[in-house]
Image (cartoon, rainbow, N blue to C red):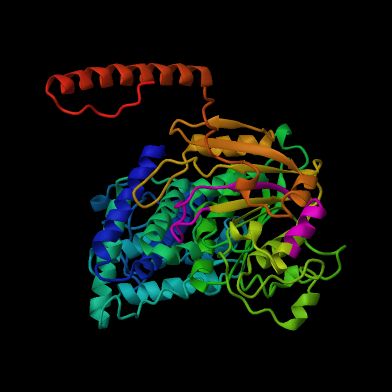
Amino acid sequence: MTEQQQRELGKVLWAIADELRGSMNADDFRDYMLAFLFLRYLSDHYEQAARAELGADWPEPGCRSEDRPPAADAAEALPLAAEPSATYEAGMRRRSPLAVWYEQNPEDIEEFEKVMRRKVHYVIKPEYLWSSIAEMARTQSDELLHTLQKGFKFIENESFSSSFQGLFSEINLDSEKLGKNYKQRNDRLCAIIQKIAEGLAEFPSERDLLGDAYEYLIGQFAAGSGKKAGEFYTPQQISSILSGIVTLDSQDPATGKRDKLNRVYDFACGSGSLLLNVRRHMGKHGVGKLYGQEKNITTYNLARMNMLLHGVRDTEFEIHHGDSLENDWDILREPNPAKKIEFDAVVANPPFSYKWNPFEEMAKDFRFKDYGLAPKSAADFAFLLHGFHFLAKDGTMAIILPHGVLFRGGAEKKIRTKLLKDGHIDTVIGLPAKLFYSTGIPVCILVLKKCKRTDDVLFINAAELYAPGKRQNTLLPEHIAKIVDTYQYRREVKEELDNGAIFASRCVSLEEIEEEHDFNLNISRYVSTAKPEEPVDLDAVHRQLSELQKEIRTAAEKHNRYLRELGIPTLPFDLD
């Protein structure tokens, strides 16, 4: 699958969403469409694995519905689609070979599904495969809605060997947003699914394709949702900066990327795109397990689907639905430092200046007791300290935060000061404005380490490094590479960009931060993007002024001569 095909598929699916959602809220329609893409992915992957498992016993495609023997029930009698690579019209008129095998080998089904659970980690009954659902949509079956409900429930409760309870809990197929009665809802679902099937049929069936399309649609829906989108989506360009940083060797980034990250953690994981970006940087075998935490139930389900869509096995990730600030995940509640779980990389884009209400006992919480509590008006440092507590000694943490954490006083200054004195703040990166869907303000990235070789802080001012857009600014690949390269080699630069602006970086000692700036980390105090004034050649200016004075004297004399000839009083120019 080429990048061009990936972009084209994303555009096709987005056009379908734009056409079919009508007056439905973009967030609501997103949940339906992404759930259907997820079902398509699970079905394709399962059928491919089933074909490999059955080998020569895999029935030849092409068994038409009229050729099949009488079925025991209506669901089993459903005509199924051909392999995804067939054209839509031909494919939708054929039954799935897996359905044929189920009919021909009823006594082997139980053993077959045991094998599939062991190898693929899940099972989907033929009647719930995407090809079955798409054929029902094509033929406008009255039972489509009921079959979808049964299929989603089966996937949640029986399909996976591990628990995927509630995966479709926010997909309300009985919602009046789809229609006022069953028939209207069923008809609407038929139209949506048929359009998606037709759109997908124009592209090859590859495992990464739907994962990329899913990510593209999440981004498009995020753009259309405005501020709400910031709750669940970090733009890929910014994710790539964080991933590029945390995948480098912690002690000496200049030596390059680490061989492996055993555990990666995002405590505000949203749709999971940031975790997947780290995995993409490391390669599928470069990460042991991904851990995510998400408070919003809808977004939590999106994240779990997103993991599976990108080929991450259910044993290779763990997403917890809960509140990071309350630390309600059992695996993170170990108070004994010797036994606590630690992560080689921690990445996060938590909600900015989130208002929280810490209870009194939280001051004794093992995450906060050495630093103090963040103020109720802004939980930014509470999020930071939560993630930092679980960072391994040789790990790297990169977190996106509002600029206020760099200079606000009170409790935040106390936390910032201790982090600096303990040598934990490694790098401060200032990013341009208008990069996020949720806010137009510029943000920063803080890079933290529990053990670092240098005792200074690297400041990178990239506020002017972007490609301008109408609503959003963009970081191009070369911009991302420049920021990561500056961090990796700890470069000190001040260079003019193509747009005439300045990109600058500087390593600053703790003494300067303390003595001259009282632990204020406002980036412009250390690295300014203002252009230096051009030097003035005073001798040249003097010569120019002298010439101008001569020209004035000559013009004044000439003018007054004409006035005298006309008998008019002359102008009082001082010609001396």
Residue at horizontal 32 percent and vertical 57 percent from the top: 81
Q: Is residue 242 magenta?
A: no
In the picture, measured across the screen, residue 11 lies left or right of residue 273, that is left
Q: Position of residue 276 (x, y in %)?
A: 56, 51
Q: Is residue 575 above or below residue 367?
A: above
Question: Camera-side residue: 241 or 188?
Answer: 241
Magenta residue span? 414-442
Q: Position of residue 266 (x, y in %)?
A: 63, 59
Question: Camera-side residue: 399 or 273?
Answer: 399
Can residue 555 be spotted in the picture?
yes
Q: Position of residue 97 (x, y in %)?
A: 39, 55
Residue at horizontal 81 percent and vertical 43 percent from the top: 455
Q: Is residue 135 above or below residue 83?
A: below
In the picture, measured across the screen, residue 362 lies left or right of residue 109, that is right
Question: Camera-side residue: 383 or 277?
Answer: 383
Can residue 99 be spotted in the picture?
no
Residue at horizontal 59 percent and vertical 64 percent from the top: 268
Q: Is residue 138 above or below residue 355?
A: above
Q: Position of residue 262 (x, y in %)?
A: 72, 50
Q: How many marks?
A: 0
Can you say which quadrant of the picture contains the N terminus?
top left
Residue at horizontal 46 percent and vertical 60 percent from the top: 439
Q: Is residue 428 above or below residue 226?
A: above
In the picture, measured across the screen, residue 421 lies left or right of residue 145, that is right
Can you say which quadrant of the picture contains the C terminus?
top left
In the picture, measured across the screen, residue 64 lies left or right of residue 478, that is left
